[in-house]
Image: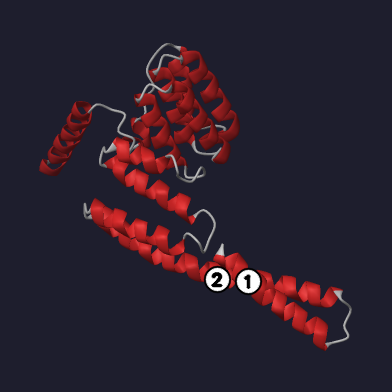
Amino acid sequence: MLSVLISLVVASIFGAAIYLTTSLHPAVPAITALAAFTLIYVIILKQVMKRIGVSMDAVQKDIMANRPEAAIHKLEVVKKKYAYWQFFIDKQMNAQIGMVYYLRRDFSKAYDFLEKGFVRHWVAMAMLAIIQMKRNQPKKMIATFEKAVAGTRKEPLLWSLYAFCLDKIGDRNKAVSIMEKGLKKIKDDELMTTNLETLKAGGKMKMQGYGDLWHQFQLEKQGDLIRKHTKAMQGRRKMVRR
């Protein structure tokens, strides 16, 4: 990565200069060089992340304005421009691009990017696992979810999605064990506890309590979503009339 290389070169020159021009103990130039490396690296990192943050704000505006092509283009530019400056930038941008394609229901293109995404981006990893489930690849789905929960242990929806997908492919016993494992990590999550009891009783998990975070994964039939949105709108109209 360029940020590390630049920091290392500048710090080495600085340390060598102190060593060659002073009679200080050799440990002093070494410690000074290490401190310089850390300082330079932090400064470069902050500048890179600041610029990426500005670009991501623009991407978010494109997504909110329903301009997915523009959002994807900006993400590709960020990946190309900063991938060599900082670790995992390319993987993070791949995850973001994959998510945009997923939300557009272009699952084929989404898969290509999500597969190369950042393992600690749990939303992207969950989307990848869901595509694998839809492709009838249960072993890959489980492996992907396992990576996701290993990297993000404290997210209730991730554990619930894992269990939901296991139940959907007919492995209810494993779904129960995953919910139990998740509750040990999170503790006292009411929605997870309720869904665990539902699974044990042979019922279907209720995920609507997660709101839009749940809906983005598009695991409900489109007709069901339309009916729910219609019902919600009718409820709002009644409240307004009153």
Residue 63, percent from left and from top: 27, 53
Q: If the image is split into quadrants, where does the C terminus sit?
A: top left
Given residues 78 and 163, the one toward you in this image is 78
Residue at 45% over, 38% down: 125
132 on left or right of 66: right
Residue at 51% over, 17% down: 174
Say which mark, if any, is on residue 44: 2
In this view, the mark in front (2 or 1): 1
- Residue 109, placed above or below residue 76: above
Residue at 62% over, 73% down: 40
For the residues bearing labels 2 and 1, Cβ distance under 8 angstroms: yes
User: Which residue is denoted by mark 1 in the rendering?
Assistant: 7
Residue at 57% over, 67% down: 3
Quadrant in which residue 188 is drawn: top right
Residue 177, percent from left and from top: 55, 20
User: Which of disc 1 and disc 2 is earlier in sequence?
Assistant: 1
225 on left or right of 142: left
> How many numbered discs?
2
